Amino acid sequence: MKIILLGAPGAGKGTQAALIREKYDIPHISTGDILRANIREGTPLGIKAKAIIDAGNLVPDEIVIGIVKDRLAKDDCKSGWLLDGFPRTVAQADGLSEFAECDAAVDISVPFEILSDRISGRRMCACGESYHVSTLNGATTCSKCGGKLYQRADDNEETVKNRLNAYKTQTAPLIDYYAKLNKLITIDGNKSVDEVFKAVCLELEAK
Ligand code: AP5
């Protein structure tokens, strides 16, 4: 299965990706995770990307297209993949279509007024696990690995405004893009994580 996860910042792409990866045994490729790993490691790409991500803007198309092209060429992607956060512009979608074709593009749709709360309440663990403060009951460590939870650098109010704006102007047009290709699946993301996951699986299996 070759799947693209669309959806605004905070829509639940990463949360659903972890479940989809486990159920369908396909690699989860998040351009955001790859960029953040480069920032942590201080690579030239990470140094360039940090200022852009901290401002809530999009990293240039040619950089992320190159990252995804290299990643999809790896052996573990031969029989399927799950792209999370890519493509994010029409140019990226066109770029992807030159070296890979998806089976479905899943748009997780959540009202904008809910997204800011989800993002500002998100807490992360270095192991990749993600939480929301409303369900942590004051816990400050990861229930899976015991790691210390932290807030992402770009999960602050000002940056979130820019990220949502970048989504509206540059990423939302991909909904029509994939609808025209008859690949679009739209899921109501304003439900519990389990309900969203059930809906995603039902739609994917019907595609
Ligand atoms: P990226 O890492 O892709 O971030 P994003 O798209 O902004 O998405 P988020 O990770 O914020 O949210 P999510 O949808 O994964 O939600 P999550 O599951 O965590 O990108 C970061 C930056 O990198 C970009 O701004 C850009 O600069 C750069 N970048 C990345 N890819 C790029 C590209 N292709 N081109 C150019 N630049 C690129 O959930 C959020 C919160 O909600 C969590 O607290 C979670 O617990 C909670 N939650 C999840 N589901 C539910 C639910 N159903 N009900 C209640 N709460 C829920």
Image (tube, helix red, strand yellow):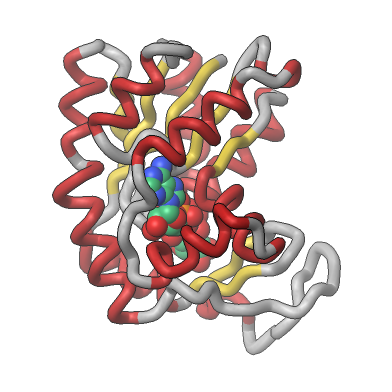
Q: Is residue 162 left or right of residue 29?
A: left
Quadrant in which the C terminus appears: top left
Q: Please tell me whether residue 119 is drawn above or below residue 8 in the rendered image.
A: below
Q: Say if residue 7 shows up in the picture.
A: yes
Count of numbered badges drawn on the protein: 0
Outermost residue, bottom direction?
138
Q: Percent from the top left, x then y, of residue 159?
A: 32, 74
Residue 24 image offset from top left, x and y in percent: 66, 24
Give the residue drawn at x 21%, y 20%: 179
Nearer to us in this view, 108 or 5: 5
Side of 24 where 14 appears, left or right = left
**In the image, what residue occupies the spot 44% across and 32% down?**
65
Towards the viewer: 135 or 87:
87
For the N terminus, the quadrant is top right
* In-image side of 116 versus 147 (left or right): left
Q: Residue furthest front?
A: 44
- Residue under the point 54% across and 35% down: 67
Residue 11 coordinates in the image, percent (x, y): 38, 53
Name the residue located 70 percent from the left edge and 84 percent from the top edge. 139
The answer to which quarter of the image holds residue 57 is bottom left
Q: Residue furthest right?
A: 145
- Above or below, comparing residue 108 to residue 130 in the picture: above
